[in-house]
Each structure stands twice: as structure tokens, then as C-alpha cells.
């Protein structure tokens, strides 16, 4: 399952957008596990954002309210060992957020098959 979101009209930072994407990934995973009635599967979350990786590792740092709420959702729905880094070039999710023609998007096999190293 995949999900893409467009940036909001209100100006926000890239790290906040990345943190929101991580929160969506955790929320979607919980929903899929409940709907498909599958539990105890090994789940990994892949991101090309080092700020998300670092936020997942923080346990006691102080954050602004928005970041604290997002990190709380991430911590409650995942373990920091589940978060892995993928470089931007290999990230299959980037195809949904890059400007491209529909034909080029549909021809992109990486979004369905994942990067070669998987």
C-alpha cells in the first residue's frame, strides 16, 4: 500500500513534512495490521530523512508541541530498530512526490518492486 500527500498551503519545513510522512507510515501500518488481521510480522520503515531517523532515536529530548506529538505517535506505533535509512536515489516513494508525466510515473517499476537491495 502506498500513500502520497501534497505539501500544505501553509509554509512548513521539510523536516516537519518528513516527520508527518513517518507518522502516516506508522498509522497506516497499524490500520493494515488490524484490517488484514496480521500481527507479529516483521515491519520495517524506510526513510531518506536523517532527521526522522534521529527523532526516532530520541527518547527524552524536548520538542515543540507539533514535533512532540508526531514523535509520540511514532514511538507508540514502532520501535526505533524498525527504522532504516534508504538513499534518495533508491527511495521508491520519491516517484510519487516528483514532477513527472503520468507515462513516466507508470513506467517506474521501482515504486511497485522496491529498490534492488530489497
Image (tube, rainbow, N blue to C red):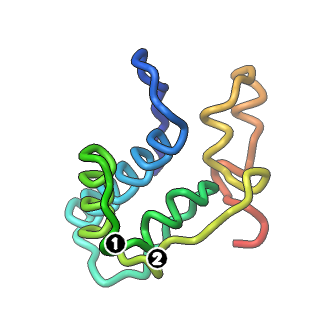
The residue drawn where x is 70% and y is 33% is: 106
Which quarter of the figure has residue 98?
Answer: top right
Closer to the camera in the image, 16 or 1: 16
Closer to the camera in the image, 87 or 43: 87
The residue drawn where x is 33% and y is 49% is: 67
SS for dot 1: loop
Task: Count residues near mark 2 (Cα–Cα under 10 Å), then give few for <14, some for 14-19, many for 20+.
Answer: few
Q: Is residue 17 left or right of residue 88?
A: left
- How many marks can you see? 2
Q: Quadrant of the C terminus?
A: bottom right
SS for dot 2: helix
Q: Is residue 111 left or right of residue 75?
A: right
Quick check: 70 above or below 108?
below
Q: Is residue 58 left or right of residue 76?
A: right
Expressed as whole percent of the image width and height from the top left, the position of residue 80 reads: 43, 77
Expressed as whole percent of the image width and height from the top left, the position of residue 7 reads: 48, 26
Expressed as whole percent of the image width and height from the top left, the position of residue 100 reads: 74, 23
Quick check: 3 above or below 59?
above
Residue 26 — which label?
Answer: none
Q: Is residue 88 left or right of residue 10?
A: right
Which quarter of the figure has residue 48?
Answer: bottom right
Name the residue carrying label 2: 82
Real-space Cα separation, disc 2 to disc 1, in angstroms: 7 Å
Task: Count residues near mark 1 (Cα–Cα under 10 Å), then give few for <14, some for 14-19, many for 20+.
Answer: many
The residue drawn where x is 36% and y is 49% is: 24
Disc 2 and disc 1 in contact, CB within 8 angstroms: yes
Residue 78 — which label?
Answer: 1
The residue drawn where x is 54% and y is 57% is: 51
Expressed as whole percent of the image width and height from the top left, the position of residue 19 reads: 43, 49
Amino acid at each position: 500500500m502506498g500513500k502520497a500527500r501534497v505539501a500544505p498551503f501553509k509554509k512548513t519545513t521539510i523536516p516537519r513534512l518528513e516527520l508527518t510522512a513517518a507518522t502516516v507510515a506508522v498509522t497506516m501500518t497499524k490500520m493494515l495490521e488490524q484490517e488484514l488481521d496480521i500481527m507479529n510480522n516483521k515491519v520495517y520503515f524506510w526513510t531518506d530523512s536523517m532527521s526522522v531517523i534521529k527523532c526516532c532515536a530520541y527518547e527524552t529530548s524536548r520538542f515543540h508541541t507539533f514535533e512532540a506529538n508526531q514523535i509520540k505517535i511514532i514511538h507508540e506505533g514502532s520501535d526505533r530498530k524498525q527504522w532504516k535509512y534508504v538513499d534518495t536515489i533508491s527511495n521508491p516513494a520519491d516517484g510519487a512526490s516528483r514532477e513527472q508525466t503520468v507515462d513516466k510515473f507508470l513506467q517506474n517499476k521501482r515504486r511497485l518492486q522496491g529498490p534492488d537491495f530489497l
